[in-house]
Amino acid sequence: MRVIPNDVHQTEALVKLMTHFSWDWVGVVYGDDDYGRAAHQSILEKAKGKVCFAFEKEVTHYLDHVDVDKQVKDAVDTIRASSAQVVLLILKPQLVEKIFKLMIQTNTSSNTIWIASDSWSMFGPLTKIPDINKVGDVFGFSFTMGNIPGFEDYLKNLRPTPGARNDFIEEYKELRLNCSISPLNCSVDELLGVVDLREVYSQRVAIYAIAHGLKKILKCNETACNSNINFPPWQLVESIRSVNFKLDGTTHYFDDNGDFTDGYDLIRWKKTDVGRIIEVVGKFLLAKGQVELLNEFHELNSSVQVQFKCLKSCRPGSSKSVTNNSCCISCIVCTEGTYTDKYDESSCHKCPEEQHSLENATECKTFIEKYLFWWEAYPIILLVATAIGIILVFTSFIIYLTHRDTPVIRMANVKLSCFMLLGLMVSFISVIMFIGRPNKPLCQAQQAVYGLSFTLCVSSILVKAYHTFVTFMRLNPSTQHHLKKLYKPLINVFMLTVGQGVILLFWLIFDSPDVKREWPETGMVKYVICNEGSIAGFAVMHGYIALLAFICFLFAFMVRRVPQDFNDTGVIIFSMLIHLFVWLCFIPIYINKNQTEQKHIVQASAVLASSYAIILCHFVPKCFLVLWDLSGNSNSSRMGRLSRHVGHHTEGTDTELHDQGQMTLTPGIINQGVEEDSAESVQIVSTLSSDDTTSPVHTVGLSEEHRDGTIN
């Protein structure tokens, strides 16, 4: 057991001293013995992240070593060359003396602050070195010191009795005063000069600890002891280990290792006219783990500040970084997702789940959800475009119903056109579902509503294109007859739409679209989007519509030479090309992981573009013809254009177009080699509704019963 703290606390106290005065750029010189190396390693470990070492020099511990002076000089040169103004010396007193004398010779240490290890912090002869005041401030730690009442008077009056000899005093004088060399210095009065009365305080504490242990074993009170004085030594040891007593206002007790826990005294070598004296300026208390200055020495906090520091204080939002123990600490800005909210944090803290931070952040914040808000610019544009589209659809529907008996509307097939308008109306409405915060039902409805509605529209166009193809394409009569049997407009549209419905049903059952909060791995924004669920389902749905559109394009392209008055091949080709082009442009944005926030915007725009392509190509021109070009829309005008087309393809034959719409060919023109497809192309007018009462002519075409050359 010891009445001093464990040695492991010494290095902790030294590091706390450095951090208390903000000495973070320090040099260290240590001995190559076990004590010096162990203390050096302990200092490095405890100072990591708090103190940076400008240099680390090792000096031989042995005074008779052949290179001792050379190594000391190298250490002094390193101290002089370094920018560090604080130097820790973990050396025996004799080596410290050599260093001080070299520094005094060059007068280069007046601004240096020296930190003393316990091996020389209380070594009196060092305080008497000539010109010791030229050395800078010296700080260190000693074991707790105090004054022993009456001890100074005891030393003053310590005299051997006349004719007697005190061998203890003689031995002490010889050891401390070298009496054999300088007998003049060996008076008894010199004891007061060489004995530090405070240093022996720990002996007093030890005696009190033993006394309290004996008192406990012997069960003593203020007047007597009641127990047997015959006890084994181990019992006294156990009793002393458990004592807890107060002396001079301080409580003393042993820890589990048998060491006192009272801490250390912080000392400073104070300058005087005759050298230095050692004074206590503060304490290091183990319980608090902090250096505390005595009240009368608080000015030291400002007077011992160094000019050069390795590190300025790291502000909140950054942390201290140490790559090794011999370089400066640098302030590292906290990266995204980390933060510090205090000064000089050793590391940045990770943000909790569902929170994030930007660089150099002092706190974490909840992610900002991003989606198409109703009040933002682009959603407003989508709403305006949708409203205009719905108005166009509704207006077209009214015009088609009002003017359903006109040739233009009849040729457009009113029933199929109404299905197209219904699909377009729902398709425009589906755009609204892309605005606002998504939820699972809304995500499912986005795809299902658009998929079914646009399939209905494209299916109706496909049926129209198929009818034109079968009517005007030059085919084998038998093949053409069989193809005509497949033309069942309502059934065809229904079956094609049901096919899309089956695709959507499987998609929604097995891997339905759902809400997804996607973070682009940077920033404070998380995008709330609709995840398509099964990519295969998403691709098949759009692929099905694209396939129908492509087939429409093929049918219309193969009969593109038919007069536009009698079919929609031109507008079908153009509208389907627009649709295919729009969705092809959508693919690269959709598969690009960095375009997360653009996916729903692009898809809504693609829906609008496809819908507008159809309404503007198929309906708006016809509505214009019906309302503002009635003369060109008359039956006679249309029949005139048909006559010119047929005349171009039957050049060299006799034809006659009657006012009632009858066209007569010279008998035998088929046998004379006139192109059969030109004759058959006249069948276009058969697309007029059979209930047309405004014209006496219901069909114009070549039939088996009119091979005499008259086309009805």
Image (cartoon, helix red, strand yellow):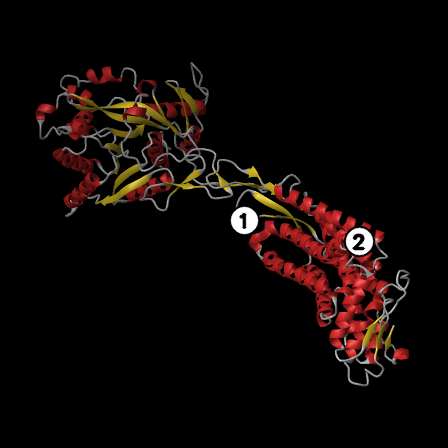
Side of 632 where 290 appears, left or right: left
Judge by depth and name the residue closer to the eye, 128 or 679. Answer: 679
At 68% from the left and 55% from the top, the residue drawn is 533
Three-letter amino acid code at the position of disc 2? Leu
Q: Nearer the viewer, residue 317 or 188?
A: 317
In the picture, the quarter occupied by the C terminus is: bottom right
Q: Is residue 250 left or right of residue 556?
A: left
How far apart in space, not on screen, are marks 2 and 1 (Cα)?
A: 43 Å
Element on which disc 2 rests: helix
> Which marked residue is nearer to the observer: mark 2 or mark 1?
2
The quadrant holding residue 580 is bottom right
Q: Quadrant of residue 13?
A: top left
From this view, report whether residue 683 is shown above or below residue 343: below
Is residue 507 positioned above or below 99 on the image? Answer: below
Provide the residue designation for mark 1.
521
Residue drawn at x 43%, y 14% is 222
Q: What residue would you read off at disc 2?
A: 422
Q: Earlier in the sequence, mark 2 or mark 1?
A: 2
Would residue 200 be seen by someone viewing this image from the given angle? no
Circle 1 residues within 10 Å: few <14, some 14–19, many ≥20 = few
Q: Quadrant of the N terminus?
A: top left
Q: Could you tell whether 402 is left or right of 184 in the image?
A: right
Report if residue 282 is visible in the image: yes
Q: Is residue 607 above or below residue 383?
A: below
What kind of residue is marked 1? Glu
Look at the picture and state if 601 lies above or below 655. Answer: above
- Measuring from the top left, give residue 555's x and y in whole percent: 74, 70
Residue 399 place in picture, x, y as percent: 81, 51
Q: Residue at x 78, y 49 (%)?
A: 395
Q: Secondary structure at mark 1?
A: loop
User: Residue 17 location, x and y as percent?
Assistant: 33, 31
Percent coordinates x, y for residue 254 in the rendering: 42, 30
